[in-house]
Amino acid sequence: MSSLPNSVLITGGTGSFGKTMLTDLLADGVPEIRVFSRDEEKQDALRNQLSDSRVRFFLGDIRERSSIDRAMEGVDAVFHAAALKQVPSCEFFPLEAVRTNILGSENVIRSAVEHRVKSLVCLSTDKAVLPINAMGMSKAMMEKLAQSAAREIGEGAKTTISCVRYGNVMCSRGSVIPLFIKQIKTGQPITITEPNMTRFLMPLRDSVSLVRFAFMHASQGDLFIKKAAASTIADLVTALLGLFEVPDHEVQVIGWRHAEKLYETLASAQELATAEDMDDYWRLQLDERDLNYKKYFSEGDVEIVHHDDYHSHNTSRLDVDGVKQLLLSLPEVSLELESWRKDR
């Protein structure tokens, strides 16, 4: 990072992202990292695993402002990863998504501003773009809350608020790759929803790099996305079957889950019209106009560049061999392959 913070708070710090970011921060030599989550069991397991005095654990829920305030005191940087992330769960219990992803995020944002945190990076998802499900809608509202607060406090404020948006994190909790591997190893049919469905594929290390990039480069209200490759679900399954050398393993198409899309979108055409291309990343800049729209009616911006939406159907598409190489770069998959070969 450009300027090493003395103290970092990770909300949802016992999740896949949080643990990976924690490992990176410890390697960087950050003096104090605070892990905030509501899962006592995961905190205890992580505490025993690390045994590092630089890590402090805060038990609490972002739904409760007082608990996040206690963890926020004296922090330099906050990475806000706590969320309800499962599409079906949020679809059946949308109010829970509102309470955590919207109201809980507002608590984190306001607490960070009031405690004069230097940088707050909020983690969002491609499902927040043109959302059709409760999870995506709640994450879209989280982005709006972050941008509203950024607009309110302005560029010269003590706190810089930014967001990042990324697609499916490979081998994270609830992702399909661990499920598919489990089905292969237990001899169960691989269950897929729609073979032609495409998804962005992002290793966990890339999501951490994206957050670090936002921390280093954000101006007030920026939203960053990483340019990412995608794959069809069919090619992902074929690649896994090839790696595990079971090409004839049964595959069942079970149909679409609640509120799924054929493809996911990382940035809309409207957002890209004023975005800054930063090589591997896009910076989607805050719309700083105020409520006085009258002055914008008489003339438009002729310099706007027109783009298509940036989605998993029109990004670079990995073939089966490309997916295999990406899978082999994941430590989790390599370990599963090693144990599979030993047991056969």
Image (cartoon, helix red, strand yellow):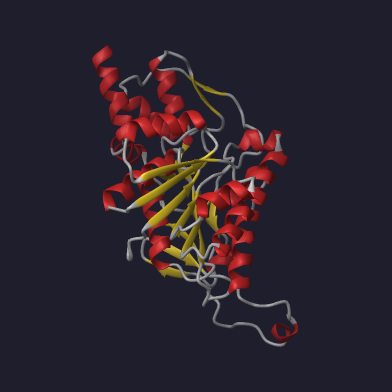
Along the horizontal axis of the image, is 262 left or right of 323? right
Q: Where is residue 129 in the image (x, y as percent from the top left)?
A: 60, 54
The total of numbered circles placed on residues is 0
Name the foreground residue: 317 vs 299: 299
Along the horizontal axis of the image, is 39 left or right of 301? left
Q: Which residue appears at 46% of the width and 14% of the height? A: 188
Q: Where is residue 119 in the image (x, y as percent from the top left)?
A: 46, 63
Residue 302 visible? The answer is yes
Along the horizontal axis of the image, is 325 left or right of 188? left
State whether residue 194 is above or below residue 53: above
Q: Which residue appears at 42% of the width and 21% of the height? A: 182
Along the horizontal axis of the image, is 181 left or right of 301? left
Q: In which quarter of the image is residue 212?
A: bottom left
Name the foreground residue: 176 vs 109: 109
State whether residue 242 is above or below residue 223: above
Name the foreground residue: 298 vs 214: 214
| Image quarter of the C terminus | top left
| Image quarter of the N terminus | bottom left
